[in-house]
Amino acid sequence: MAKKAASYRMGIDLGGTKILAAVIGPDGAILGMAKKKTRDELGPDGVIKRMVDTANEAAAAAKISLKALAGVGVGAPSAVDFKTGVVYSASNLAGWDEVPLGARLQAALDLPVLVDNDVNLGTLGEFHLGAGRGCRHMVGIFVGTGVGGGIIVDGKLYRGARDAAGEIGHMIMQPDGPLCGCGRRGCLEAFASRTAIERVVRAQLAEGRPSILPELLAAEKDRMTSGVIKQALEAQDPLMVEAIGSAQYYLGLLVANLINALDPEMIVFGGGVVEALGGDFLAPIRETALPYLLQQRNADKIKIVPATLGDQAGVLGGAALLAPFTARKA
Amino acid sequence: MAKKAASYRMGIDLGGTKILAAVIGPDGAILGMAKKKTRDELGPDGVIKRMVDTANEAAAAAKISLKALAGVGVGAPSAVDFKTGVVYSASNLAGWDEVPLGARLQAALDLPVLVDNDVNLGTLGEFHLGAGRGCRHMVGIFVGTGVGGGIIVDGKLYRGARDAAGEIGHMIMQPDGPLCGCGRRGCLEAFASRTAIERVVRAQLAEGRPSILPELLAAEKDRMTSGVIKQALEAQDPLMVEAIGSAQYYLGLLVANLINALDPEMIVFGGGVVEALGGDFLAPIRETALPYLLQQRNADKIKIVPATLGDQAGVLGGAALLAPFTARKA
C-alpha cells in the first residue's frame, strides 16, 4: 500500500441507509463529496455498483481523476477482516456475508482499497482530524441506533487479534437485563442506544403516561429520530428526561469501566444521539463515571468530549487509512 | 536506559508480605534468587533497606556483582508513575504514598531502576517467558486477595495515559453489588477475589450451613488460604462449590467484556487462587464468556490459559523491562 507523504485519497462510508464518498486532500480537507441512498434491497452487487457510482461522482465533484488518488478507504457497518477486505455479517445490510468488498472495489476502481469497520473509521477520523487531534490514547463511543466503539492506542487504531476490538456496545452491564439487538441480554446497547431509549419511552406511552411525544412523533411519521428526542428533552418531557437519564447513567458506567481498563487521555462521543443533544449530554456521563475510577490521580484531566466531524468522520477516517496527513494550515 | 542485547538484569517483586529478588540471565533464566519478609510496619525507609538487602543476597546467590547488571526492574503493589518511579497509594503497604522508590533504589544500588505496577510486571513476565510467549495481544488476569490485570498490545505492555491501565478488578459488574475493598460497590473484585469468596462462604457458615470448612480453617489458624479453598473444593464442599461457581461466573462476564472491547489472542489467568485450583478453574469461565462475544468468528481460537511462572512472573517481568531477552535454548 502506497503511503505517499502528500497525496489525495478517497473515503467511502457505506451505511445501512446511505453511501457517502469524499475526495480528501493531503491535509485532510474535503475537496468533493457525493451521497447516494444505499438501497440495500439490491444486495451486495447492486450496492457495490452504487458505491462505485458514488466514488465517481465524488471525484467529479472534486474535479480530480480517480487515477490521481493514492487509494480508497472504506467503512462498512459490519465485522470486517481488515487484512483481506472481506465483510462479514453486516446486520443492517441484507445478504452481506463474506462479501470480498475490498477486492470488488479494487477491481472496479483500479485503485488500492482498504476496508474497515465504520465505527473504527469514525474513531480514526476524529483522532486525526477532529476532537482527538494530538491525543495518544483515545476511545471513540458512537451512540445511535446501536452503540459502537473504536480504540486508539499509541496513535494507532487498535483492531485486536480478530479485527473485532471496540465492540463496547456489547459489554454486559447486567446479565438479566433487557434484550439487545444482538440477541443477548443486558448489553450496554440495550440500555443506552436510541433503540433502547425508544423502547423505554414507548413502553411508558403504552401505559398512558402523559407526554409531548405522541405529538412530536406524529410530525415524523412515528419515527423516534434523534431530532424528536432532542425536541422532547427541550420541552422537558418527563418520559424522555427519565429515559435519557438512564442511558447517560449506563454510558457513565461504561466510561468508568473503559477508563479503569484502558486509561485513555480522551473519550470522544459521537453518533446521531450525541450530535442532536450536543455537549450537554456528556456532563451527567462524566459525573457518573469519575467516582468509579480506581485511580483518582489526574482523573480530572481525562477529557470526555463531543465529536466534531459529524457524519464526515467516517470518510475522513477512511482517508486516514491510506496515507498520513500533512499538517493543516489553520 | 541501556538496552544491551545480551545482559544480566535483576527483577524485584515488592509484595505486601514478601520481597522477592532474582538475577536473570539474557535468555530469561533465573541465576539466583532471594526472599525476605516485607515487614511493612517498618515503613518505606525500612522496607527499601530490606529490598536493597534482598537484591544483594540475590546477586550473591547468582555469584554476580551488582555492577555486572544492566539494571533493576521493580514491581510495586500500587499505582506507580512509570516515568518517574514514584509509588502512589499502595493499599497494602502502610505509609507508602508518593514514595520515590525508583530514585531511592537507584541511589542505593547504583544501577538504573525502573518501577512498575506488580500486576503489569506479572503480565509482562508471562508474556515474554510464560504462557503468553509468541502472542501479540494478551490480557493477564491475576486472582488473589484482589483481582488485577495487565494488557499487552502489539507486543508491548500498555500502561495508558496515567499509567493506570489494567485495573480490571474495578470494572463495575453491578452498581448496587457487594462492597469492594476499594470502597465502591459492585466491582469485579467484590465478586471474584479470594476476599469475595471468603465473604460469601463465611456468611453461609454464620448461618449454620454444614460444611467441611470449619475443620479445614482450624488447621490454618482460621485463614482462608488458596490451599483451604482447594481442599474444600476437592471435598466437594457445597458452600465452596457455590462460591467458586459464582466467582467463575463473574470472571466469565469480565472475560467476555474484555474480549468484546480488546479482542486479545490470549487471556492468561494467574494469581494464588488460579495457581491453587489449576487449569480446571478456567473451563467454566470460558463457557460463560464465549456466548457473550459479539464476534463469534474464530472465537474458538481465543486462548484462555493458566499462567505458568507462578510467583516468579513478577521478577521475570521486572527483568523484561530492562532489556530484551535473547531466544532461549530449549
Image (cartoon, coloured by chain):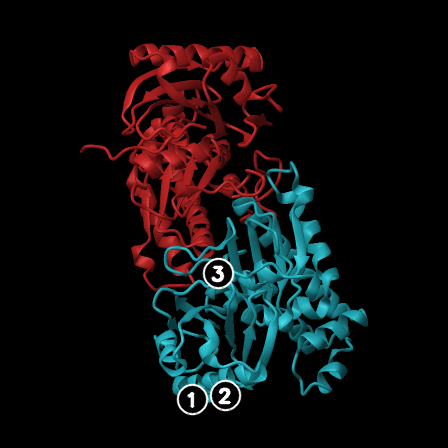
Chain colours: A red, B cyan
> Is residue B177 in sight in this rendering?
no
B227 relative to A280, above or below: below
Q: Dot 2: what SS?
A: loop
Q: Which residue is mark 1?
A: B46
Q: Amino acid at mark 2?
A: Arg
Total labels drawn: 3
B308 relative to B21, above or below: above
Q: Nearer the viewer, mark 1 or mark 3?
A: 1
Q: Is residue B309 left or right of residue A298?
A: right
Q: Earlier in the sequence, mark 2 or mark 1?
A: 2
Disc ID at residue B167? 3
Identify the subunit bearing mark 1.
B
CA gap, disc 2 to disc 1?
8 Å
User: x, y percentage for residue A161?
Assistant: 57, 43
CA gap, disc 1 to disc 3?
28 Å
User: x, y percentage for residue B208?
Assistant: 72, 77
Sort mark 1 into few (<14), some (14-19) or many (20+) by Cα contacts within 10 Å.
few
| Residue B328, picture quadrant | bottom right
A39 relative to B109, above or below: above
Q: B260 or B156, which lies in front? A: B156
Residue at position x 37%, y 40% in the image: A269
Q: Is residue A30 left or right of residue B175?
A: left
Q: Nearer the viewer, mark 2 or mark 3?
A: 2
Q: Nearer the viewer, mark 2 or mark 1?
A: 1
Q: Amino acid at mark 1?
A: Gly
Q: Which residue is mark 2?
A: B39
Q: Amino acid at mark 3?
A: Glu
Q: A16 or A214, which lies in front? A: A16
Instruction: Look at the numbered discs 2 and 1 and tell me whether their residues touch, using CB distance below 8 Å.
Output: yes
Q: Return the residue found at the far left.
A: A330
A177 relative to B36, above or below: above
